[in-house]
Image (spheres, rainbow, N blue to C red):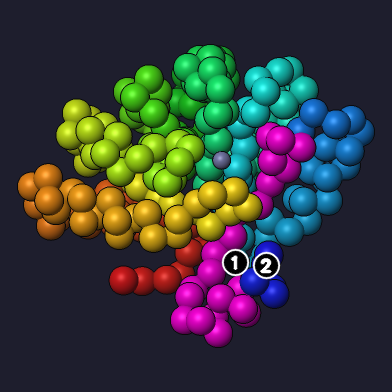
Amino acid sequence: MITFETKRAKEFGIEHFVCISVNPKEASERPLALDAMQAMTKYLGRERVVALGELGYNLINHLEEEIFVKQMDIAAQLDMLMTVHLPHNKKPDGMKRIERILEGNNDKSGTKYNRKKILVDHNVEETIEKTLELGMWAGLSVYPITKLSPERAIKIIKKHGTERIMIHSAADWGVSDPLSVPLTAREMRKAGFSTSDIEKVTFYNAYEFFKQSPKFTWKP
Ligand SMILES: [Zn+2]
Protein backbone atom coordinates (compact mmCIF):
# COMPACT_ATOMS: atom_id res chain seq x y z
CA MET A 1 0.00 0.00 0.00
CA ILE A 2 2.72 2.45 0.91
CA THR A 3 5.27 1.69 -1.78
CA PHE A 4 3.94 -0.61 -4.52
CA GLU A 5 0.51 0.98 -4.92
CA THR A 6 1.96 4.48 -4.72
CA LYS A 7 4.30 3.66 -7.57
CA ARG A 8 1.57 1.91 -9.57
CA ALA A 9 -0.79 4.88 -9.13
CA LYS A 10 1.92 7.29 -10.24
CA GLU A 11 2.29 5.40 -13.50
CA PHE A 12 -1.34 6.30 -14.19
CA GLY A 13 -0.94 9.93 -13.16
CA ILE A 14 -2.43 9.56 -9.69
CA GLU A 15 -0.87 11.01 -6.55
CA HIS A 16 -1.48 8.31 -3.97
CA PHE A 17 -1.78 8.84 -0.21
CA VAL A 18 -2.60 6.22 2.37
CA CYS A 19 -4.64 5.76 5.54
CA ILE A 20 -3.72 2.67 7.53
CA SER A 21 -5.21 0.95 10.55
CA VAL A 22 -6.49 -2.29 11.96
CA ASN A 23 -9.90 -2.26 10.32
CA PRO A 24 -12.99 -2.74 12.53
CA LYS A 25 -13.77 -5.91 10.56
CA GLU A 26 -10.54 -7.42 11.85
CA ALA A 27 -10.67 -5.96 15.34
CA SER A 28 -12.48 -8.78 17.16
CA GLU A 29 -9.72 -11.41 16.98
CA ARG A 30 -7.44 -11.75 19.98
CA PRO A 31 -4.51 -11.62 20.22
CA LEU A 32 -4.27 -11.06 16.44
CA ALA A 33 -5.82 -7.58 16.39
CA LEU A 34 -3.55 -6.28 19.14
CA ASP A 35 -0.50 -7.78 17.42
CA ALA A 36 -1.58 -6.32 14.08
CA MET A 37 -2.01 -2.93 15.69
CA GLN A 38 1.49 -3.05 17.08
CA ALA A 39 2.87 -4.02 13.67
CA MET A 40 0.79 -1.32 11.94
CA THR A 41 2.09 1.52 14.11
CA LYS A 42 5.57 1.02 12.68
CA TYR A 43 4.31 2.34 9.35
CA LEU A 44 2.59 5.49 10.59
CA GLY A 45 5.72 7.57 10.15
CA ARG A 46 6.08 6.68 6.48
CA GLU A 47 6.02 9.46 3.94
CA ARG A 48 2.64 8.70 2.31
CA VAL A 49 0.66 7.81 5.43
CA VAL A 50 -1.62 10.77 6.13
CA ALA A 51 -4.19 9.25 8.53
CA LEU A 52 -5.17 6.37 10.76
CA GLY A 53 -8.20 4.72 9.27
CA GLU A 54 -10.62 3.30 8.90
CA LEU A 55 -11.25 3.03 12.62
CA GLY A 56 -14.61 2.41 14.23
CA TYR A 57 -17.21 -0.31 14.43
CA ASN A 58 -18.45 -3.18 12.32
CA LEU A 59 -20.56 -5.40 14.58
CA ILE A 60 -20.41 -2.82 17.41
CA ASN A 61 -18.90 -4.69 20.35
CA HIS A 62 -16.38 -4.03 23.10
CA LEU A 63 -13.54 -5.86 21.33
CA GLU A 64 -13.87 -3.53 18.34
CA GLU A 65 -14.15 -0.58 20.68
CA GLU A 66 -10.93 -1.51 22.46
CA ILE A 67 -8.98 -1.43 19.18
CA PHE A 68 -10.86 1.69 18.04
CA VAL A 69 -10.02 3.70 21.15
CA LYS A 70 -6.42 2.49 21.27
CA GLN A 71 -5.94 3.66 17.68
CA MET A 72 -7.66 6.98 18.42
CA ASP A 73 -5.17 7.44 21.25
CA ILE A 74 -2.26 6.75 18.90
CA ALA A 75 -3.63 9.28 16.40
CA ALA A 76 -4.09 11.85 19.17
CA GLN A 77 -0.58 11.25 20.45
CA LEU A 78 0.94 11.66 16.99
CA ASP A 79 -1.46 14.50 16.12
CA MET A 80 -2.55 12.56 13.04
CA LEU A 81 -5.81 12.64 11.11
CA MET A 82 -8.29 9.80 11.56
CA THR A 83 -11.07 8.41 9.43
CA VAL A 84 -13.91 6.65 11.25
CA HIS A 85 -16.11 4.04 9.64
CA LEU A 86 -19.79 4.01 10.61
CA PRO A 87 -21.06 0.41 10.71
CA HIS A 88 -23.31 -0.75 7.88
CA ASN A 89 -26.03 -1.76 10.34
CA LYS A 90 -27.28 0.19 13.35
CA LYS A 91 -25.42 3.35 12.34
CA PRO A 92 -27.11 5.53 14.99
CA ASP A 93 -25.89 3.10 17.68
CA GLY A 94 -22.35 3.38 16.33
CA MET A 95 -22.72 7.15 16.31
CA LYS A 96 -23.87 7.17 19.94
CA ARG A 97 -20.81 5.20 20.94
CA ILE A 98 -18.51 7.57 19.04
CA GLU A 99 -20.13 10.49 20.82
CA ARG A 100 -19.67 8.80 24.17
CA ILE A 101 -15.96 8.26 23.47
CA LEU A 102 -15.51 11.90 22.45
CA GLU A 103 -17.53 13.33 25.34
CA GLY A 104 -15.85 11.03 27.84
CA ASN A 105 -12.53 12.56 27.00
CA ASN A 106 -13.37 16.19 27.50
CA ASP A 107 -11.04 17.92 29.89
CA LYS A 108 -10.91 21.54 30.99
CA SER A 109 -8.34 22.55 28.41
CA GLY A 110 -10.42 21.22 25.52
CA THR A 111 -10.62 17.71 24.17
CA LYS A 112 -8.24 14.82 23.95
CA TYR A 113 -9.31 14.13 20.39
CA ASN A 114 -9.13 16.98 17.91
CA ARG A 115 -12.48 16.71 16.17
CA LYS A 116 -11.32 18.85 13.26
CA LYS A 117 -8.97 16.00 12.47
CA ILE A 118 -11.67 13.33 12.41
CA LEU A 119 -13.59 12.33 9.29
CA VAL A 120 -16.64 10.15 9.89
CA ASP A 121 -17.47 8.08 6.89
CA HIS A 122 -20.58 6.38 5.45
CA ASN A 123 -22.95 8.91 6.94
CA VAL A 124 -26.68 8.63 6.21
CA GLU A 125 -29.76 10.72 6.95
CA GLU A 126 -29.82 9.52 10.59
CA THR A 127 -26.17 10.31 11.43
CA ILE A 128 -25.14 13.39 9.47
CA GLU A 129 -26.49 15.91 11.94
CA LYS A 130 -24.64 14.37 14.87
CA THR A 131 -21.37 14.11 12.96
CA LEU A 132 -21.47 17.81 12.11
CA GLU A 133 -22.77 18.88 15.51
CA LEU A 134 -19.85 17.12 17.19
CA GLY A 135 -17.48 19.20 15.05
CA MET A 136 -16.19 16.44 12.80
CA TRP A 137 -16.06 16.15 9.01
CA ALA A 138 -18.71 14.06 7.30
CA GLY A 139 -18.19 11.66 4.42
CA LEU A 140 -21.02 10.51 2.16
CA SER A 141 -20.16 7.27 0.36
CA VAL A 142 -21.90 7.06 -2.99
CA TYR A 143 -22.27 3.52 -4.33
CA PRO A 144 -24.36 2.11 -7.19
CA ILE A 145 -26.27 -0.38 -5.00
CA THR A 146 -25.33 -0.37 -1.34
CA LYS A 147 -24.79 2.81 0.68
CA LEU A 148 -25.96 6.15 -0.76
CA SER A 149 -27.31 6.87 -4.22
CA PRO A 150 -26.43 10.28 -5.73
CA GLU A 151 -30.05 11.33 -5.09
CA ARG A 152 -29.86 10.57 -1.37
CA ALA A 153 -26.47 12.29 -1.05
CA ILE A 154 -27.85 15.38 -2.78
CA LYS A 155 -30.90 15.45 -0.50
CA ILE A 156 -28.62 15.34 2.53
CA ILE A 157 -26.52 18.22 1.16
CA LYS A 158 -29.66 20.24 0.40
CA LYS A 159 -30.72 19.87 4.00
CA HIS A 160 -27.38 20.22 5.79
CA GLY A 161 -25.38 22.53 3.52
CA THR A 162 -21.87 22.13 2.17
CA GLU A 163 -19.70 22.83 5.22
CA ARG A 164 -17.43 19.93 6.24
CA ILE A 165 -19.33 17.49 4.01
CA MET A 166 -17.58 15.49 1.30
CA ILE A 167 -18.72 12.97 -1.28
CA HIS A 168 -16.55 10.03 -2.15
CA SER A 169 -16.72 6.73 -3.97
CA ALA A 170 -14.80 3.48 -3.88
CA ALA A 171 -13.03 0.94 -6.04
CA ASP A 172 -13.51 -1.95 -3.66
CA TRP A 173 -14.07 -5.69 -3.88
CA GLY A 174 -17.85 -5.38 -3.98
CA VAL A 175 -19.96 -3.50 -6.49
CA SER A 176 -18.68 0.04 -6.57
CA ASP A 177 -18.23 2.79 -9.14
CA PRO A 178 -15.05 4.89 -8.95
CA LEU A 179 -16.84 7.51 -11.05
CA SER A 180 -19.61 8.10 -8.50
CA VAL A 181 -18.16 11.49 -7.53
CA PRO A 182 -18.32 13.05 -11.03
CA LEU A 183 -21.71 11.38 -11.45
CA THR A 184 -22.99 13.07 -8.30
CA ALA A 185 -21.44 16.38 -9.42
CA ARG A 186 -23.41 16.13 -12.68
CA GLU A 187 -26.61 15.39 -10.76
CA MET A 188 -25.93 18.36 -8.46
CA ARG A 189 -25.52 20.59 -11.49
CA LYS A 190 -28.90 19.40 -12.82
CA ALA A 191 -30.42 20.05 -9.40
CA GLY A 192 -29.29 23.67 -9.60
CA PHE A 193 -26.32 23.78 -7.19
CA SER A 194 -23.68 26.45 -7.83
CA THR A 195 -20.26 25.48 -9.16
CA SER A 196 -18.64 26.50 -5.90
CA ASP A 197 -20.98 24.32 -3.84
CA ILE A 198 -20.36 21.37 -6.14
CA GLU A 199 -16.60 21.88 -5.96
CA LYS A 200 -16.72 22.10 -2.20
CA VAL A 201 -18.40 18.76 -1.56
CA THR A 202 -16.69 16.88 -4.38
CA PHE A 203 -13.20 18.29 -3.94
CA TYR A 204 -12.24 21.21 -1.70
CA ASN A 205 -13.65 19.94 1.59
CA ALA A 206 -11.70 16.71 1.23
CA TYR A 207 -8.64 18.74 0.31
CA GLU A 208 -9.09 20.98 3.37
CA PHE A 209 -9.42 17.95 5.61
CA PHE A 210 -6.41 16.03 4.32
CA LYS A 211 -4.11 19.01 4.00
CA GLN A 212 -4.16 19.25 7.78
CA SER A 213 -1.61 16.45 7.53
CA PRO A 214 1.87 17.85 6.79
CA LYS A 215 2.47 14.74 4.70
CA PHE A 216 -0.41 15.53 2.33
CA THR A 217 1.78 17.48 -0.07
CA TRP A 218 -0.47 17.53 -3.12
CA LYS A 219 -1.79 20.95 -4.18
CA PRO A 220 -4.63 21.87 -6.57
ZN1 LIG B 1 -15.74 2.02 5.62
- Which residue has dot 2 on it? 2
Q: Earlier in the sequence, mark 1 or mark 2?
A: 2
Question: x%, y% of residue 24?
Answer: 68, 34
The image quadrant that residue 84 belongs to is top right
- Which residue has dot 1 on it? 48
Q: What residue span does the magenta drawing correspond to?
A: 6-26
**Is 216 displayed left or right of 172 in the figure?**
left
Find the residue positioned furthest to the bottom: 11
Q: Residue at (68%, 56%) from the top-left corner?
A: 44
**Quarter of the image containing the N terminus?**
bottom right
The vertical placement of 204 against 48, above or below, is: above
Q: Residue at (48%, 38%) from the top-left corner?
A: 146
Do callouts 1 and 2 mark residues in contact (Cβ within 8 Å)?
Answer: yes
**Is 198 displayed left or right of 54 in the figure?**
left
Callout 1 crowding tier (Cα within 10 Å): few <14, some 14–19, many ≥20: many
The vertical placement of 86 against 177, above or below, is: above
**Residue 21 part of the magenta-drawn span:** yes
Disc number placed over residue 157 in the picture, else none: none
- 16 and 74: which one is in front? 16
